[in-house]
Amino acid sequence: MMKQIIKKTNSRTISKLKYLFIVAAIISYISCEDNILPEAGSIPDLTPPEAGFVATQGAGPNDEWKTYTFANLSTGATMYSWSFGDGNTSTTFEPLNTFPGEGTFTVTLIASDNLGVESTYTEVIEVVQPIATVIPDPVLVNADFNKLPKSSGSDCSCSGWINKSLGDQGESSSGNGGSDNVVKFDNNEPDHVYQEFEVTPNADYTITVVSSFKDPLNGTYPSMLEIRVLAGSGYVSNYAPTYYTNTVDFPQDGYGYTTISQVEDPTNNLLTPIMPISNPSDTSYLTNTFTFNAGNNTSVAFFMRGIGGDSSVGNFGYTSGDEEIRVDSVTITAN
């Protein structure tokens, strides 16, 4: 009887050991699988980040060439780490960086997502100072209003400056220490000067005018000097400008701008606002400056006249006022 009990006990013991072994094996298997399976609730990273950027050099008259703009082309990322190769770093999405000067710099962008996956893009930037573009000054003929021959009629300080479709020609006069060296806009007359010249598109220019007014008469019509810069797009239809070098070659009528309404059309004016020079109550020759941008024009026209008078007088719809105006020179320079 004792032997049977022992056998039964041994049988149960063996079964129990088998059960424990199987359980241990399962636990071990699960433990190993935990080491290689994703965390509970995780999903595959179907859109891993991919880094990329484009660098654009700045432009301007000073040191803007040292500053680059970085357009971020990365996809699938939420965080960005930049290194510009000059000691500067950034975590901005699209940063600016100002390099110390000319040289070669390795720019690196590390783009990462919320799962910690990273992508790296590197580009070598050659920073070189651009060669400055020299914009030539416009060429004006008889800019000092000397008394010179013209295509027809007597010599005049207005030679090279006549467009009889727009008014009467300015007259020769003396002033500012010389003889026959200024152009005069006589009182109560529609006197003007007009000349076309080449410009560089989108360039900025400064106009310098040296002029003098007679003493104010305190009348009904005080004189003012008006200056306009007219776009080549407003020239008479199918007109191709010619830039003459001698005053005798200039036409006197029927070219460029042919009506005052074209001149006064705001869309044709590059010098805005139009701010006439008023009588300064000083008969000295004074300097006034104006600036304009050439826009998309390769040719423009300079137009100057006396205004302020009785506009019903004459055939042009304007006249100068009660005081005579004299202009000694016009200078136009590229900025």
Image (tube, rainbow, N blue to C red):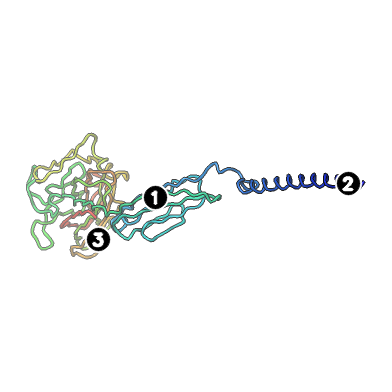
Count of residue discs: 3
x, y (%) of residue 296? Answer: 28, 43
**Could you classify mark 2 by the number of other residues whose Cα lies within 10 Å: few (under 14), some (14-19), or many (20 or more)?**
few
Q: How far apart are marks 2 and 1 (CA)?
A: 82 Å
Given the image, on which type of amino acid does mark 2 rest?
Lys
- Residue 288, x across and y down, in percent: 23, 59
Which structural element holds mark 1? strand
Q: Earlier in the sequence, mark 2 or mark 1?
A: 2
Residue 273 in sight:
no
Residue corresponding to mark 1: 122
49 to the left or right of 201: right
The amino acid at mark 3 is: Asn
In the image, residue 160 above or below residue 101: above
Q: Which of 238 and 147 is in front in this view?
A: 238
Residue lying at the far right in this picture: please name it: 1
Nearer mark to the viewer, of 1 and 3: 1
Of badges 2 and 1, nearer the viewer stands 2
Residue 56, percent from left and from top: 35, 49
Tell me the CA gap for discs 1 and 3.
Answer: 65 Å
Task: Give the residue number, with chain letter if any, for mark 2.
Answer: 3
- Residue that protrudes farthest toward the top in the picture: 238
Neighbourhood count class around disc 3 (C-alpha, 10 Å): few under 14, some 14–19, many 20 upward: some
* Alpha-carbon span between mark 3 and mark 2: 140 Å
Label 3 sits on residue:
279
Disc 3, SS: loop
Q: Quadrant for the C terminus, please.
A: bottom left
Image spot of residue 149 (x, y percent): 7, 47
Is residue 257 positioned above or below 185 on the image?
A: above
User: Which residue type does callout 1 highlight?
Assistant: Thr
Drawn side of residue 277 relative to residue 84, left or right: left
| Residue 162 lies in quadrant | top left
